[in-house]
């Protein structure tokens, strides 16, 4: 069939038919359905990806890229840290001691975790701590506290903060928990309320004194900074053998990220159903055109047009409706993402989501999968009516119509 004839048929069937307006309305609904469905799906995927990346960033900093923990009585002392630094010169290490404490206020108590660290090492691997201590030098019994805890207890700089430790001191005929007062010198904000409320940092030597530890004790673990944690964690594991547990930040929050991934997949499937429903309108529209144009199709076949050529014309018509909806849908999606990214249309509680601005990140993989999925649905929806158009009985149709 001549391409000009195919083009003529396409425009003929797309033109508004006064005798059969419902066919054109059905095609318009199919076009809008694909357009809106694809737009919503792309925006939803961008938002889900944005939240994933935002949470990954927060957990990457506060949970540290890699953490080394001793098994049984494996030593984690200064000699061990020096050995690691010589073996892995491209990595940064910050040994720590941690203990659970009870934070005592005027009329309230809260649980928390106190880390004893060397602040010079910690600032190199934790950008949140580095930002908080930009203009401060902590030493002795100074303490760095999360912003949520400071707000909850109404603390200010240089205030005293009482911490109750689990180790017991003899007092008369009884044992009482040890209490120590620290000087609040700075505050940090990680973007996640859990860390801002529970984590505190002080000098490692000061914490050793409080816990009654020797001058060069074993540390509880080592936090490690790496630009490529997925690769370096395997190198450290192979070097340390089975005496130490080497944990990546993603392993510490495995269940959380698995839940996010499952939610993202479920959302993709549900929103793809919008495009599937819209494609049913393409099927119904093309079938109505086939039924309404039976005599014209039969005449074309009688004049020498092949069934394959007729099938191509109706398949092209379906792809034109669906493809046009996809193009407009993609344009609307990018416009919506531009609006959401440049204007505060949606604001979020920062203490819950880690950011007050709606995070957006449409990955090439998600975009490609969405486009491919939509194309497959539209192609399948166009194929059945196109095939149906070639199954017309030419003699009966021309005789009766």
Image (cartoon, helix red, strand yellow):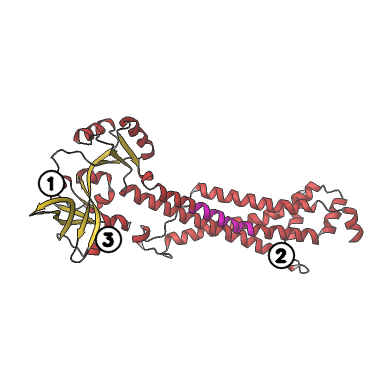
Side of 252 where 218 appears, left or right: left
Q: Considering the image in quadrants, where does the C terminus appear?
A: bottom right
Q: Position of residue 171 (x, y in %)?
A: 9, 54
Question: Alpha-carbon neighbours of circle 1 within 10 Å: few (<14), some, or many (≥20)?
Answer: few
Question: Alpha-carbon neighbours of circle 2 within 10 Å: few (<14), some, or many (≥20)?
Answer: some
* Residue for badge 1: 209
Numbered label attached to residue 24: 2
Q: Position of residue 227 (x, y in %)?
A: 34, 40
Side of 323 where 108 appears, left or right: left
Numbered label attached to residue 148: 3
Which is more foreground, mark 1 or mark 3? 1
Q: Is residue 137 visible?
A: no
Side of 314 where 102 appears, left or right: left
Task: Check if residue 274 falls in the magenta segment.
Answer: yes
Side of 299 where 52 appears, left or right: left
Q: Position of residue 243 (x, y in %)?
A: 29, 33
Compared to residue 173, the image places residue 24 above or below, namely below
Task: Check if residue 313 falls in the magenta segment.
Answer: no
Can you tell which quarter of the image residue 194 is in? bottom left
Which is more foreground, mark 2 or mark 1? 1
Observer-nearest residue: 208 or 49? 208
Question: Alpha-carbon neighbours of circle 3 within 10 Å: few (<14), some, or many (≥20)?
Answer: many
Sequence order check: which comes first, mark 1 or mark 3? 3
Which is more foreground, mark 2 or mark 3? 3
Sequence order check: which comes first, mark 2 or mark 1? 2
Q: Which residues are magenta?
A: 263-277
Element type where label 1 sits in the image: helix
Q: Position of residue 295 (x, y in %)?
A: 85, 58
- Marks 3 and 1: in contact by CB < 8 Å? no
């Amino acid at each position: 069939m001549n391409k000009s004839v195919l083009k003529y048929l396409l425009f003929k069937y797309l033109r508004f038919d006064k005798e059969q307006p419902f066919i054109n309305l059905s095609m318009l609904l199919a076009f809008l359905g694909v357009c809106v469905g694809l737009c919503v799906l792309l925006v939803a995927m961008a938002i889900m990806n944005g939240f994933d990346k935002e949470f990954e960033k927060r957990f990457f900093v506060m949970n540290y890229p890699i953490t080394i923990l001793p098994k049984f009585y494996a030593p984690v002392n200064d000699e061990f840290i020096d050995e690691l630094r010589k073996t892995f010169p491209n990595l940064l290490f910050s040994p720590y001691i941690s203990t659970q404490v009870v934070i005592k206020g005027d009329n309230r108590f809260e649980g928390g975790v106190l880390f004893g660290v060397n602040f010079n090492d910690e600032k190199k691997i934790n950008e949140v701590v580095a930002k908080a201590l930009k203009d401060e030098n902590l030493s002795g019994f100074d303490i760095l506290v999360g912003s949520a805890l400071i707000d909850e207890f109404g603390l200010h700089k240089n205030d005293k903060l009482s911490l109750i430790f689990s180790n017991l001191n003899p007092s008369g005929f009884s044992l009482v928990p040890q209490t120590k007062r620290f000087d609040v010198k700075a505050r940090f904000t990680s973007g996640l309320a859990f860390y801002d409320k529970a984590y505190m940092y002080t000098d490692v030597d000061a914490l050793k004194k409080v816990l009654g530890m020797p001058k060069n004790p074993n540390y509880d673990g080592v936090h490690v900074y790496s630009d490529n944690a997925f690769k370096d964690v395997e190198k450290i594991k192979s070097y340390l053998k089975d005496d130490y547990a080497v944990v990546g930040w993603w392993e510490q929050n495995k269940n959380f990220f698995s839940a996010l991934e499952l939610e993202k997949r479920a959302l993709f499937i549900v929103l793809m159903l919008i495009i599937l429903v819209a494609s049913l309108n393409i099927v119904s529209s093309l079938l109505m055109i086939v039924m309404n144009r039976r005599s014209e199709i039969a005449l074309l076949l009688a004049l020498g047009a092949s069934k394959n050529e007729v099938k191509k014309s109706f398949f092209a018509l379906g792809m034109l409706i669906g493809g046009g909806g996809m193009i407009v849908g993609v344009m609307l999606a990018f416009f919506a993402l531009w609006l959401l990214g440049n204007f505060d249309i949606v604001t979020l509680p920062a203490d819950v989501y880690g950011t007050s601005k709606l995070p957006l990140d449409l990955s090439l993989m998600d975009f490609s999968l969405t486009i491919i999925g939509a194309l497959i649905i539209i192609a399948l929806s166009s194929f059945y009516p196109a095939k149906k158009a070639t199954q017309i009985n030419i003699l009966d149709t021309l005789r009766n119509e």
